[in-house]
Amino acid sequence: MKISSPLCVTAFVGTSAAFTFSSVSTRNFGINERTHIAASQSSLGMALTGFLEPDTRDWMYDTKRDDRGSGTIREMERANVFNPEDDLERYIDTPESVAARHNIDGTVLVSGWVNSKERSDQTVFDMLNDEESPFKFSKIIAFVDDEKFAKKRLLSRSARYSGLLDKLDVQGAATPGSLPTAEALEGVTSWVANIEVDSENPGAALQTLKDIAAVATEATCVENVSVLISGASAINDLTAAVDAIKSLDAVQDMAFTVVAVGDIDEKDEGSRPYCVEDFGTAEGVIAVGATFSRAESLRVVTECLALESGIDKALTFKEMTGEEISNSTSSTLIKGLRQAGYTRPQEINHMLVAGVKNFTKTVDAYNKMLNDIENPSEEKVAAAKEAAEAEAKREHIELTARKLKEREDETKEMAMEWAQREYFKNCMSGDVVGTEEQFREIVWDQAMEEADKKFRIMNRIEVEVVELTDSEKRTKKIEEASALRARKNLSSNLKVFMDDDDDDGDDDDDLDDDDDDE
């Protein structure tokens, strides 16, 4: 199946702010295990119940594992690895936009509702008509068993004020409980169907799923099908369930979503946490007697129709009860999402894309890395030792080079000061006539030796006494004598030069006097 190019729409069901959605092509009717996409931050859009109260557990990183030693903790922090079980707030991303399908507009047909005298079933129509949702349907068809009865149920004041009546069209089935024909689906782009499982004949529900696929194939115009199967605890034939899913998957150019839940009850939407499994698997089997909120089931089936992450998925939603609420990973994760400000669409998208599987993978990766750190193999110990030694050697080399550079700079500075003092002393005694730069160049080697001695004394560095050989002593005396002669010669030459310059000046004065006499 191919989904056409992306299209952006705005807003989402049950939120008080606008969101941006972009379509992403995908095909896999299991839960997608990609890295999760969070959603734009907004209010939950529903009243907080007891389940949604803030958890009293401390989820901060340093409340656990501190008995493992500060070294292990520092190493884990450097690797940016943490345990989601201890730091759920860090695991849950800031809500961001979620991807919506691009083709949820045109005409939508709703079948399997408005057949009971006990309720109106208007909620599902209100969700499909919500102005803040990505749904842009121009026409909503209610396909019912009794057309007159359905009109009485749906022609309410709220339907008039919300604009539902302007889009609503009621069509009657040929026989009670029958599906729409291909002719009835002409022009329909999306189909939302409700199948109630007969506990005495659960196979009939799976056959209805196949019939939906057959009619959609014949109609050719249907692009999206979202099916709610209620009372699915009676379905335990996994092979038949997989065959029914495959029949939907075989329809060309159509995306499908199947949501299976337990027996319907009238609890409030969002009042219980839930877990998501793949329908048609052992994990997706619903326990006999398990229930699911009617309002919650409508929310899930419509949100899955809107979300890109719901494309080609067959899912089982199970409510948590009793001790499961406080002990299950899914319950903890959903509570964290709601406390982080995720809306219902954002929350459901996260549970489909990442959910418990991604959370468990992150925990397993953390535990594996922690075990590798605390119980490393011999190869890793040897490699770590080698790396530590190399690092220590590198640091030692850098420190030595830095100290040598500092010593060299300080020694040069002291040598400059010594040469300056010697020049001044020689000038005062008349032993040298010349520039300071010329004098410093001659005595620089001696100045460096004197500076080095002073540096060693200041820093309490022992001077290594080296015995010179007779040859080395003679060479040193010759060098010192040469340096002394060079200083004397420089002084003499400069003095003669200065005297000659003075004599030349006197001659010039005599010539000037002669000129004056003439």
Image (cartoon, grey):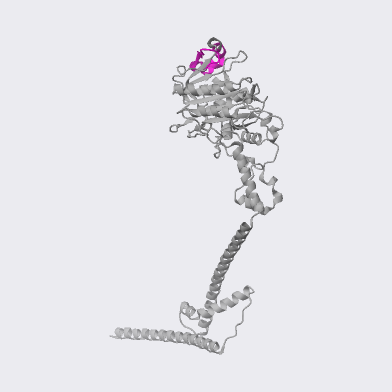
- Work out which quarter of the rendered image holds the C terminus and state it: bottom left
State the image quarter where residue 207 is shown.
top right
Q: Residue at x 36, y 85 (%)?
A: 504
Q: Furthest residue to the left?
A: 518
The x, y position of residue 316, in whole percent, is 60, 29
Residue 47 colored in magenta in the image:
no
The x, y position of residue 386, in whole percent, is 60, 62
Q: Is residue 286 visible?
A: yes
Compared with 458, 370 (above or below) is above
Q: Is residue 12 visible?
A: no
Q: Nearer the viewer, residue 224 or 444?
A: 224
What number of labels is visible?
A: 0
Compared with 442, 61 (above or below) is above
The x, y position of residue 422, in whole percent, is 53, 80
Q: Nearer the viewer, residue 501 or 316?
A: 316
The residue range painted magenta reads 150-178
Left or right, 307 with respect to 385, comes to left
Compared with 88, 400 (above or below) is below
The x, y position of residue 472, in whole percent, is 54, 87
